[in-house]
């Protein structure tokens, strides 16, 4: 099962693992913002995935995760500081009470026989990067989100098949101004890294029923015809 339950964008996953493949360090939530931005600029997924640049956004033509027969459940996990955490704190740690005590945390899980993404890009490069992706989602150190295998397939007739929506729902996070109507809007990132708060914009989150501006759809359609 995959922990976290949020929409996982393959472009963000590839960006994070590109640094590891090249011998560097993948970005993480604990890194300074300045270094995260620098990594984002060096490993932008436009190297492997087609991108639509419009209104100051660079949005990859890549969907969020799609589940096959998913089952949603909840587990609990004990959160405690390990020896390395205690050493870095440099002060006494009281595990019985206070901020250092052990905690029981709820962990939302999604279990499915397989998951998939849609994207427009370079199949060989994407397949190469995916070899280093062994886990998905949150709490990977606890064993969640193990990936058994990857398979990258080309559509038989890919030209013109890209769309920002599937069954009326946004296939990924989209800039709010790209959608004429939307049942829900929030604030967050529309391009990787998705955890970088300084890049938050008004958006339509993945999975929202919406209507995308026809001009935006035509622009993506044109890119899909030339880049596949």
Image (cartoon, rainbow, N blue to C red):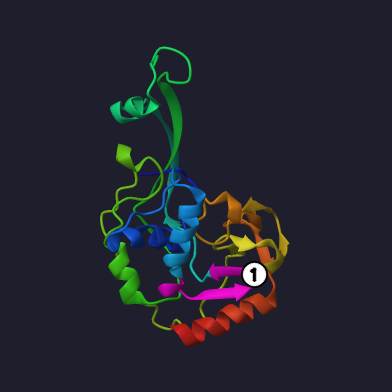
Identify the element where label 1 is drawn: loop
- Whether residue 2 is visible here, answered yes or no, is yes
Residue 153 position, x and y percent, is 34, 73
Q: Nearer the viewer, residue 168 or 97?
A: 97
Q: Decide if residue 67 is on the left or right side of residue 204.
A: left
- Residue ID at (28%, 69%): 128
Quadrant of the image containing the N terminus? top left
- Residue ID at (26%, 59%): 149
Quadrant of the image containing the C terminus? bottom left
The relative height of residue 102 versus residue 117 in the rendered view (above or below) is: above
Residue 47 position, x and y percent, is 42, 74
Q: Nearer the viewer, residue 74 or 178?
A: 178
Residue 183 position, x and y percent, is 70, 55
- Residue ID at (42%, 48%): 28
Question: Which residue is disc 1 drawn over?
Answer: 56
The relative height of residue 95 versus residue 130 in the rendered view (above or below) is: above
The relative height of residue 4 versus residue 62 in the rendered view (above or below) is: above
- Residue that protrudes farthest toward the bottom in the picture: 226
Q: Decide if residue 143 is on the left or right side of residue 7.
A: left
- Whether residue 159 is visible here, answered yes or no, is no
- Residue that protrudes farthest toward the right in the picture: 180
Question: Residue 30 occupies which quadrant of the picture?
Answer: top left
Look at the image and say whether residue 139 sits in the magenta stretch: no
Residue 125 position, x and y percent, is 33, 73
Q: Nearer the viewer, residue 161 or 19?
A: 19
- Residue that protrudes farthest toward the front in the picture: 90
Q: Decide if residue 59 is on the left or right side of residue 142.
A: right
Please state the extent of the stretch shown in magenta in the rendering: 46-59
Question: Residue 52 occupies which quadrant of the picture?
Answer: bottom right
Look at the image and say whether residue 48 sits in the magenta stretch: yes
Q: How crowded is mark 1: few (under 14 residues within 10 Å), some or many (20 or more)?
A: few
């Amino acid at each position: 099962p995959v922990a976290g339950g949020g929409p996982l964008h393959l472009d963000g996953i590839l960006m994070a693992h590109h640094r590891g493949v090249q011998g560097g360090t993948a970005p993480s939530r604990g890194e300074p913002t300045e270094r995260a931005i620098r990594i984002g600029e060096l490993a932008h997924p436009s190297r492997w995935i087609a991108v639509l640049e419009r209104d100051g956004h660079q949005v990859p033509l890549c969907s969020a995760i799609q589940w096959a027969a998913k089952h949603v459940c909840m587990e609990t996990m004990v959160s405690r500081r390990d020896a390395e955490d205690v050493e870095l704190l440099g002060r006494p740690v009281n595990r019985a009470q206070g901020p250092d005590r052990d905690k029981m945390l709820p962990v939302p899980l999604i279990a499915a026989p397989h998951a998939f993404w849609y994207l427009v890009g370079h199949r060989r490069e994407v397949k190469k990067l995916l070899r280093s992706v062994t886990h998905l989602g949150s709490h990977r150190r606890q064993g969640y989100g193990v990936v058994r295998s990857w398979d990258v397939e080309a559509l038989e007739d890919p030209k013109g098949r890209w769309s920002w929506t599937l069954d009326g729902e946004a296939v990924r996070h989209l800039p709010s101004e790209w959608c004429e109507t939307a049942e829900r809007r929030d604030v967050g990132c529309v391009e990787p890294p998705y955890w970088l708060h300084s890049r938050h914009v008004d958006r339509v989150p993945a999975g929202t029923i919406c209507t995308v501006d026809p001009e935006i759809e035509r622009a993506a359609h044109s890119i899909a015809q030339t880049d596949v």
